[in-house]
Image (cartoon, rainbow, N blue to C red):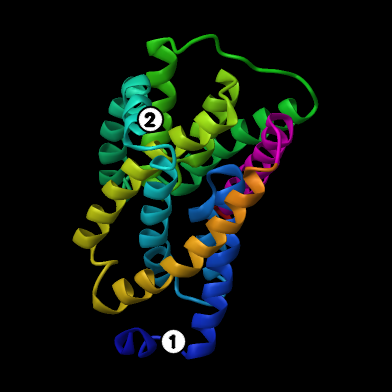
Amino acid sequence: MIQMFELFPVYQFGLAAIVAVFAGVVKGVVGFAMPMVLISGLGFFLAPEMALAGLIFPTLVTNVMQSLREGPRAAWQSVKSFKVFLGVGLIALLIGAQMVRILPTWMMLSVIGIPITLFAILQLRGIEIKVSGQPHRIAAGVGAVAGFMGGLSGIWGPPTVAYLSALGTDKNDRMRIQGVIYGLGAIALTIAHFGSGVLRAQTVSFSLAMVPPAVLGMWIGTRIFDRIDQRVFHRATLIVLLVAGLNLIRRAVMLVS
């Protein structure tokens, strides 16, 4: 903890804790978006590397909690049901992580952000896009896109949520499935950044310190989630997805300009 405060003053830690609580609330309600909220919020007053480090352990812990909310057996069933998506996504994540210095990030942000934004707008306007069952080619395609984007930029939530929305997944199943998918991705991300040097003595302390406020926020969000029906949950998910898509486009434009 002392090492952490060598990097920034105490008041910034207080601001970071507030951001973590808010990120937890959002995740508790819709099941995703914690990394995007944390990286955006922390990035206002912390260095990008510190902001990235700060999201790693809260994301890992809350996703494990989310995936195991209905027990290990239900979580394992989700793994089996989405094995093609997960398997292809993991391979794509590892490939994407190796291509960070080759492909321009703005290009990948645009490729993901534009379709996600259009999907959310169409759904919010009542134009349904549905997928019947889980054809392997669709699961593999979306898994490849989500995994590659995750390896390249640390963001794999929007493609996954769009896919689950198109499947018409029940809200409780969707929360568990998202927890499993994001949890496995968070484990890979944690290992990768121990190797990259982003996670070291000071930044590990900061990231661990962000876990309690994030868990508190998720507890609050989960209480809200338990009280809303499927329709409200679906609409809330689409609104957050729309914001996420627009944020990806914004980041792409900023990188180009």
Q: Is residue 245 magenta?
A: yes
Residue toward you, 6 or 178: 178
Which numbered circle lies on residue 74?
A: 2
- Secondary element at image label 1: loop
Residue located farthest toward the right when viewing the structure as drawn: 125
Residue marked by disc 1: 8
Locate residue 204: give its quadrant: bottom left
Distance Cα–Cα, label 2 vs label 1: 42 Å
Q: Quadrant of the N terminus?
A: bottom left
At x 61%, y 53%, the residue is: 221
Left or right of residue 117, residue 88 in this image: left
Q: Position of residue 253 (x, y in %)?
A: 60, 51
Amino acid marked by disc 2: Ala
The vertical placement of 127 against 236, above or below, is above
Q: Position of residue 211 (x, y in %)?
A: 42, 66
- Secondary element at image label 2: helix
At x 27%, y 47%, the residue is: 188
For the magenta stretch, what is the residue range?
A: 228-252
Does the magenta stretch mainly form a helix, a strand or a loop? helix
Camera sees residue 254: no
Camera sees residue 226: yes
Circle 2 residues within 10 Å: few <14, some 14–19, many ≥20: some
Which numbered disc flags the more N-terminal residue, 2 or 1?
A: 1
Left or right of residue 36, residue 236 in this image: right
